[in-house]
Image: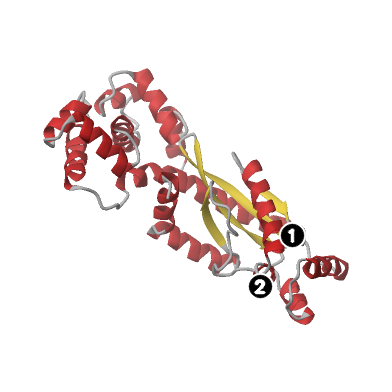
């Protein structure tokens, strides 16, 4: 499993995501899922509130292929903002990008809905596709499943997408914290190293100092740290510092330059560059967003 997939798995299993998923589905009657960018699976198959019609289609590989083509197109277009596409059967799917800093890491998705009440003519076209794909369910069952699909007005659909977008932004803000705190089993030497970094990150801390503090060679420590955490020492130290900076930015009386030096950066320019790389916006913009919320 890639480091990105591990991070998304941690997010999916987090209380905040589970609470949101339950509340969203209970309120809308729609499925919601979070999938890594490298995942190529049916996002809602087997999930609570999966569309009955889509569940029937998932029985055949040709139908799955048609759905996966829609997912691929969503992945290609939903890189910076929410996108909605219509599948060959006439149902709409929506994907919202989730980013960690400047990196796209996942899509928050919902869908399997109609944005206009389907007609008999539309159903006949869909039924023809179902037959071509080899779906063997009784026609009456297929029709009932098709017309039981949730229908959203344009305003309702816009509100659903807005809810997803707000939550995707929230997830983006907490991925950095989760990346630091992932609950993976780790050797005691790495646990001690993390503790040492937490206690001394405001200092001009070097890899050699940390390796010495945990009684290992620099080479061994560097290799082990990257293997266990998924990131190198420099990136980890930066994330710890940025996490503290986010808290300090809540204080409007502290200047950004003061915060930069307070958390251990030796240069304001370097602080600004690293903050934007990890969080996706400048410290000033991040603070302004906090003040608006």
In the image, residue 193 sits, relative to residue 18, either above or below, namely: above
Is residue 113 at least partly visible in the picture?
A: no
Counting labels gives 2
Q: Is residue 83 above or below residue 252?
A: below
Q: Which of the two residues, 16 or 238, is positioned nearer the viewer here?
A: 238
In percent of width and height, residue 51 lies at: 65, 69
- Please state the horizontal and vertical placement of residue 93, each as a whole percent of the image: 67, 56
Q: Residue furthest right?
A: 121
Which one is earlier in the sequence, the residue at label 2 or at label 1?
A: 2
State left or right for residue 5 relative to residue 119.
Answer: left
Quadrant in the picture for residue 261: top left
Residue annotated with mark 1: 115
At 58% from the left edge and 65% from the top edge, which residue is drawn? 45
The scheme the figure's colours follow is secondary structure
Q: Is residue 18 visible?
A: yes
Q: Residues within 10 Å of mark 1 (few under 14, many from 20)?
A: some
User: Which residue does the image show at 60% across and 65% down from the upper left?
Assistant: 30
Looking at the image, is mark 2 or mark 1 nearer the viewer? 2
Q: 70 left or right of 139?
A: left
Give whichever of 5, 197 is nearer the camera: 5
Residue at image location 42% in from the left, 54% down from the top: 9
Q: Is residue 62 above or below residue 281?
A: below
Q: Which residue is under mark 2?
A: 52
Horizontal side, residue 151 vs residue 201: left or right: right
Please tell me whether mark 1 sits on a helix, a strand or a loop.
Answer: loop
């Amino acid at each position: 499993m890639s480091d990105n997939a591990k991070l998304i798995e941690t997010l999916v299993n987090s209380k905040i995501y589970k609470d949101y998923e339950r509340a969203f589905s209970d309120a809308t009657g729609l499925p919601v899922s979070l999938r890594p960018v490298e995942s190529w699976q049916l996002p809602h198959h087997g999930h609570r509130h999966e569309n009955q019609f889509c569940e029937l289609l998932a029985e055949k590989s040709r139908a799955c292929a048609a759905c996966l083509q829609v997912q691929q197109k969503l992945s290609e277009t939903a890189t910076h903002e929410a996108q909605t596409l219509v599948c060959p059967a006439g149902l709409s799917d929506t994907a919202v990008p989730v980013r960690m800093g400047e990196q796209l890491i996942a899509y928050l998705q919902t869908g399997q809905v109609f944005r206009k009440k389907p007609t008999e003519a539309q159903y006949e076209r869909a039924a023809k596709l179902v037959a071509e794909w080899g779906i063997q369910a009784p026609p009456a069952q297929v029709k009932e499943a098709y017309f039981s699909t949730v229908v959203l007005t344009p305003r309702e659909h816009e509100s659903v997408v807005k809810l997803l977008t707000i939550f995707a932004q929230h997830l983006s803000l907490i991925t950095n914290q989760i990346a630091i705190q992932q609950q993976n089993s780790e050797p005691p030497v790495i646990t001690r190293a993390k503790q040492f970094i937490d206690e001394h990150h405001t200092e001009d801390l070097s890899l050699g100092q940390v390796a010495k503090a945990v009684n290992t060679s620099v080479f061994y420590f560097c290799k082990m740290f990257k293997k266990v955490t998924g990131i190198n020492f420099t990136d980890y130290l930066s994330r710890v510092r940025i996490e503290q900076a986010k808290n300090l930015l809540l204080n409007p009386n502290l200047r950004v330059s003061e915060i930069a030096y307070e958390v251990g950066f030796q240069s304001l320019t370097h602080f600004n560059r690293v903050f934007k790389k990890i969080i996706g916006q400048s410290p000033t913009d991040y603070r302004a967003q906090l003040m608006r919320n």
